[in-house]
Amino acid sequence: APPVERPSDVSDAPPAAAAPEMKIPASMSEAIQLWSAAQPQQNGADMFSWDDEELLLAATEFNANVPTSGVNPQLDKLYVKGSLSPICDILYTLTRKQRGGKPPPPLTDRQAELVAALLQAIYRIIPCAKGYKMLIEIPHVCDIFGQLLVFGQTDDTIAFWATAILRRLMRCPLPDSIVAGKEQEFKEQEYENKKCMLGSRVLREALLDLLDSALSDLRTYAPPKKNEDEDKQEPDEDDAAPLGSEASRKSESKSKKAGEKLLSPQALAAAQARSDREQARRDSEVEAQRAKERERELDLTDEDDDPRGTGSISTTSDLVLMSLSELLEAILCSRAETTPPEHQHNMLKLLAERHEILLCLLRTSCALTIENAALLLTALVTREPKVADAIADAAMSEAVVLRHFYNGVFSPSGDQRFISRYLVQIWMSGDHSGSAKRLLKHMVPTAFLTYLNMPKLTEPEDENLNSIEEEHFRLSTQASDANSLASSANTKRLKERLKLTLTYSVAQQAAEEAEAARREAREKEEAARRGAAARAARAAANPHTPVKGGYPQVGVGPNGAPQTPPPGPGPHQAGGMSLAPPPLDPNQPQSEAPPESPVNQAAIAAQLAAKRQRDLRKRTREAAAEVRRRLGEENFRVLFFQLTQDQNLADLVWNARTRQELRSALETELASFERQQHLRGVGRVAWNHEQFHVRYESMSGEISVGGVYLRLFIESGDSFVASLPNPQRLFELLVRRMLVEADRNPALCNTAVRCLEKLYRVHHRKIGVFEDMDVVIAILSRARDRELQARALQLLLSLGKYDENAECMLGDAAAEVLVAAASMCHRNPPTIGNDLSRSTNLLMLKNGQAGAPTPHMRHASSTPGTAPAEKAHVEEEGIVDADCPNMWYIAPPGRIPPPARSEQGPYRIPRMKELSDTGELHDFCLCAPAVTAGTYDDSEGGLDKGVDTGLWRPLTNHPTLRWVVRGTGPEIMRPGGFSLLALQMLYRLATLHRGVDLRGVPFHPIPRAKQLLCRPSLLAPLAQCLLANDVDVVDTTAQVLTALVAHNPDVCARMYRTGVFFFAMAHYGQGFVHVAKLVHAMHLRQQNRGVEDAARVGYGVGGKSDKLPVHKRSALAPLLPPALILYMYNYGYRKFAEAFCGDVETPEVIWGPKMRERLIDLLGQHLGDFPLRLRQHPMLQYDYTPCPTVVYPQLEEEMFCHNYYLRLLCDERRFPDWPIMEPVKLLYAALEFHRDEMKAPLDGGNGPAGTAQRDTALGFDEALDVLKLKIGFDEKELRKAYRSLARKYHPDRNPQGREMFEAIQAAYELLTSPRAKKVLAQRAKNSAQSGAVGDDDGPDIDRLRLILHTQMMVYRRFPEDTADYKYPAYPLLLRNLRESLAPNTQNEYRCPPAESGQLGVLLRGIKLCYFTCLSTPGNAKELIRQGGAAVLFDVLHAMIDSLVEPTRDDGAEWVLPKAERDVDATYSDSSEKAQKVDILRTTLKTLAGLSFFPEGRDSFLPMQELLAQDLYILAGLSRLPKCVQYALEFVDHMCAHGELQLSLCRAGLPWRCVPLLLRYDAAADKPESPTGEDVPEHDRETQLTSNTHARLAAKALGRLGGYMLNELATAPQPQVQAALADLLTPPLARLLRNKRADVLLAALNKDVESATKIWNGQMRAELVEKVGGVVADRPARHMDAADVLLAEGQGFRYSSLEGELCIGGIYIRLFVANASTRDIEDSVAFGVSLLEFVQAALTEGGEDDGAAGRAETPSVFAALSALKELLLVDDHTILSVTARTPEGFIGLPVLVQLLSTFALKSQHFQLTSSIFGHLSPKEEFSAALCEHRLLRSLVVALTRARTEDDEISDQRRRQGHTREVSSVGDLGMSAMQVKVGGEEHCWDVMEALCSSTSVGREMIRIGGVPLFCGALVGHPKFSPSMAARVGAMRCMVKMSKNTVVGVEAATVTPNQTFYPDNQPNPRTLALTRTLTPRCSRGSCPTASLTLC
């Protein structure tokens, strides 16, 4: 292998694959043996001798058999050690110093060859597992390599292989298979290698000496001598060869060949042979691939390119430089982590001292060397910042910076651009004032430096820039994509290496300082510890030393740490460690502690260590910040990218031409400097970088101020302007340029002004206050250039954004100039048409004639921009100026005023321009405007003109005239745009300061701006800007004026004198918001008239007249309708603007384009030629003249009442529920109209104002005389007469003419009223000369209808608001109703015809009555008091009489269509039928309401019969359900009066009510159908109405019949009740007394059968048939007699109720069958009814029937059965038997009477006895018997003698016959048998009663005992039955057993035999014998008899 073979590990990465496994070759063993046997021999002169040839051959053969990658990594360490030791011994022998420390002698050629071969062998041996370690363990290895590096200064081969071995030691490259899992071990080995080798100072210095020697030719260049062979070679092959080019590769090949020449030809041949054999055994593909990879790393560029242009002039071997650079890079950069810090520091220190070496490395042609040099520079700059400036200065002195800047911009190689840019960044980063930055500013425009401040790019952004840049260079150089990809990969790799170096450098520096701090702390602690031990030892050796003598007592601090005094300096301290104990000071207290205490020393050391750590961290942060500042903060990446791109910015113009100029300048400078280096030598000439400048000739035409190109600055956007770094400086420079060029170069001055405006607009906060505002004002005032005028005004506007700048403008000069500029809007050129005319297609008038628009109605846009062609503009202006009057006089300069003979004129503007062009008119000529009296159309003879001698001024003092006449140059904007800028500035001044404080209190005095601008001379021109034909100007003017009058009452009150209201209303634009806001702010604050005058003439007055209506106080009163003024007052200016510009017709506003056209036209006539004069003289002031009131024909027939037009407000179909803000005020206003309308109208009266003015109003003749007019005048003559007289007598001009002015105003208003037009037209037609005006016949029907409708609507919609107010106009209203009816010949009122219009009045009047009564009861009573009931009855009667066939009609003729059925008929399109029906309904409803009050019912008495008949008819109009409903309600209320109730009954109202009961359907009241079927809505509504009628009818029947109770009670009508009981059945008729009739109605309309109700369909049919027949036969207007009420209904019977017994409303059969009191309201009353019925049965009938015959009937039996069931189911019903009713009836005597009446064995007796049996246990029963003295009757009934029937029944019973109960016959009750009852049961009851003490005593009192005795002994007068005897005996036994009653009974007994003692009485025995046979059957208690 060649001895100078390129090592395989020159890169950072280890070998790609491990060396193949092989045995140790024989040659190697031989070589090892040979090396081992080689012993140095000392022989005289030659210190050593051996067989060099044999050793060289052995080494060569070894190198040939082992690849450069090394031996087998697993080679045994014995062989490694056996190989390395002999070689190193040989090398040590050759390199060691001679005796006396002399350096070794130079090597001979053969020795040099041997050393090179041995180094190659070491290079191959050490890359194994033990090779690195074995090598550094060899003694003197550092000395050996140090001396070899010295030899390398003269021998490149030794230098290369020595550095290659060191490089392997510094990197330890091994295959991955060996390193895997042992990374840390090899890192430690690498660390040991570096520690060993770099620990030698000789080696470190030798390494840099070698590098310095290798670069010596680059620093001192001498042209080589050329021989013949060299002449044949390519010229300058090695000079300036680009990296990676063919020349570079040839240079490397040349260096290799030079190395090969070092060996002999024989050795080379042998080695070549062995190498060929060995190469066959190796893997050729792996070696070839590895060679290709390495070659790609070296060949970075194409052969034909010279992208780097390094300018290399090297003649040394690049391999040596490359190897040295890689060695240093491994030590300090990529492998620095394994380099000991102290060795790093030493190497960096050496490298910093010799930093020029690195710059020389950058001149080499090897790309890898340059990269390593860049990495080393990075490490050096970051680790040694002090040397960075020196390196940068050296780089500039050698023009290296220039070369790499050139490469960074123009090199097509991406790798070269990257490395060059990085180097430039290293050298140029830092202070901007340094030489490097100055050089950069000299080379490129300064604006490029702003890119350095951009933030660091992200990786995607960087990649994006790379792709753009690569595409740019690829297209420009046509490079291949493969080269671009390779370049990109290499660039990426280099970036990673740089990043790693930077990161490690910063981290290593911090780590080193941290370690130094820790080491210092440890040293301090160790010193303190040793000092403490020494002192302790001395103290032990001297026991007499006091304990507290010289040593401190150690205290404990608050945190537990030792606390000692701080150490002090002393002679005994050295280095912080005590060398000897301090001497004792006798003056020192023994308690003080010396500072060198061990604990104290440790604390001091800790404090110092902590401080050291803090300082270290601070320095670390500062160092890191410095690194970032120098290498990271300045973004050179973006700078170089922008240098490759085109730029067209205000401060930077960069394109291909400027880049070419830069390239040419750099190439020229580099070529010149390199030529000097060739001539003088490298390092002997320095580049004068301070004088180098690049001139860009292509930019010489651009005007630059402060580095900014003015043309591009104007074209740039605000974002660029905002990015300027120093706008203050640029602003100052631009101001200077503006002042310099103002008079000299207007175009340049314009440019400067534009730049100033734009700059200040963006940077006004940074620039701050501009105190020279007067300068700009002066420029604006004196400038003739039209563009400069506009630019200066724009600049003022931008400057004025800053408050302090605006305050500088608060002066007279600025205010006058700005107002003059604002008035230039009158010079705006006209355009055809305007917004209003285009939208409405209206024809505007000029001077009363059809034609073009008036001058003040022309429109133009104010948008600033390029004006039209100058010629067209001049022609257009000339056409307009030709219509204007001559306004200007001129005179030559001189005295003021000039002589009359020198005056010229008057002229128009075009003529003055001609004079200026000819030079006759110049700035010093005198000018004065003409004064005109009157207006353009005042007279036919023209104008009375003259010059005002007090207004002569030089032309310079007339700014508007000077700008127009003397102006030069084209206009950049219309005059309207110029004026708009001035107005915006004025608005800024007007709003600069607040007008009120935080409380809203105005300031005094007012702000300075308002004081200036509100002067009459300035305020009037401002107000006149409203006449401009520019919408934007008008809007801005309105804003300015609004701001001026805000909180400025004095000025606001006088604004009318400027004509501002005329000008504002004459504006035709659609955007009216700002104008409306201005008018809204002022119209109520003018003080042009007195309050006392305004009440009469209706003109605008001052603010203190708040008692007047708003439309009377407003200054707009003569111009606008009152509705529009009130609309603005109520809703604000925005709504007003919308209405004013639109077409509106609402109840509050009527306004449209035609009305606005009329207003503008009349205002144009009033202003006359003033707008034309303004065009000639924009500062002319308006001569105020009051404007006559504008009359609008569209409003002549309208009634305006309190904010609303009544016609539209009452049109509730178009405007339903229109909002009414103040309904009560509207009501009272309508009442005033109503009152006035019902009286004779006044002349000119219109509504309520007519009443107030009736006494003082002028007549028509007087009005004509005042205005000096005759009948037949037209509107133009009227206005002209008013205008001339008003101007003459206006109080502001003529204080004595106030009265005349008021008369003029009143006359004008009278003659312009609608009524005056009608009257005067009629007079003119009839040629009448009288001034009297006849009264009208009556009120206007249409007006009256609207007035009544308004009142009605207010009461209807706002009942809560009107509830507290009494309606005061009932007399008028009732009068209207009377007059609306048409009386016939019999003086009866009839319904008025529809064509008369009275029907509408009648309808609204009736509704008004209803709603007024509905709002409050007081109104109803007032209506009654005013006789309203009679009037309403007349209306009702008239409406009913209008029906056709009322007796047979059910209202079918009156049925309305569905659309009108439930709709209010007050709509204007309602039919006559609908109105009549509505009148009928409303009248009936109102009367029904009045009848609720007693007063109302009393008022109906006079017409009660007619009213009852009418109600009878109305209740039958079933097709008019509302009428039926209100009629029933009316009947209900009237029944409260007995007389009216009787009249209603006589009229037959019950017959109308009964059928309505049968139309009820309970299912309709439910929201859903019970069957689940959908019911049509119409049908459901109809049924709901029927249900309402049914309920009302039930209530009416209850009231008519007197059924109702409590508050609804009425006088009973027995006849009516009887008839209803027959018609409805008594149970149902009784339900009429209920308030809620649902139960009755439900029963009547369904089949029901219960104890309380029986009803079915058959009964309904019979009832309907009956009632229908009666109604059909009954006349409509018929009154029955009082004693035959409802006679047709009495005696009516239903077939379904035949045989049913009904007592007390209860059907007995059904009650007995289902005994229950659930449906019975009062069970006690029912029981009483039963007993009353039985009593009636006992008393009724003939005498022949007897009592028993009369009583023993089926009905009595049924009643008793019901009574029995009632007592069983309800215990409370015993009261019906025992208690006394209010009528005095008691039921118990009836029952006792029944016992004595019925036969003892009869069914009735048994039933009665069972009732007694149920009652007997009740105490109430016994008490009642005693109370009512019924016991004797009861005993008599039981003991009475038996009849023949009794005997027969008893006999049948004894015979065992079963007794059957007879049927109850026709009552429908089935046969029944009474199981309980009879005589025995009665005696059981009596026995139970006798057990009571009270009953016993009562029995004794009434003589009951003798009766018992009579029954007992069988007396003929007593009952002979055994039951009676036994019962009597049992009763007596009961009484005898009672201790109280028995004693009393003994006193009344006839003898004592009744009380036997021990012996029986004979009478008793006889009685016993008598009774025994009868008792033999055992049927009686014999034992009791025996006991007795």
Image: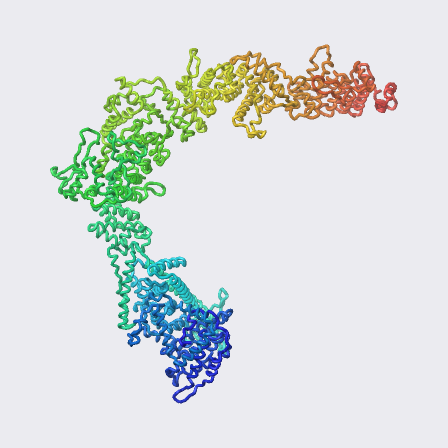
Q: Position of residue 710 (x, y in %)?
A: 26, 53
Q: Quadrant of residue 1939?
A: top right
Q: How many marks?
A: 0
- Identity of the residue furthest to the bottom in this view: 44
- Identity of the residue furthest to the top in this view: 1744
Considering the image in quadrants, where does the C terminus appear? top right
Considering the image in quadrants, where does the N terminus appear? bottom left
Front residue of 548 and 1709:
1709
Front residue of 266 and 1830:
266
Q: Position of residue 677 (x, y in %)?
A: 28, 71
The chosen color scheme is: rainbow
The answer to whether 1029 is drawn above or below residue 1726 in the figure is: below
Q: Position of residue 173 (x, y in %)?
A: 46, 71
The answer to whether one can see residue 1964 in this image is no
Left or right? Give the position of 762 relative to 62: left
Q: Quadrant of residue 1264?
A: top left
The answer to whether 883 is drawn above or below residue 1702 in the figure is: below
The answer to whether 1019 is drawn above or below residue 131 in the figure is: above
Q: Position of residue 1128 (x, y in %)?
A: 35, 33
Left or right? Give the position of 1170 relative to 1841: left
The answer to whether one can see residue 1796 in this image is yes
Residue at horizontal 22%, vertical 45%? 970
Q: Quadrant of residue 688?
A: bottom left
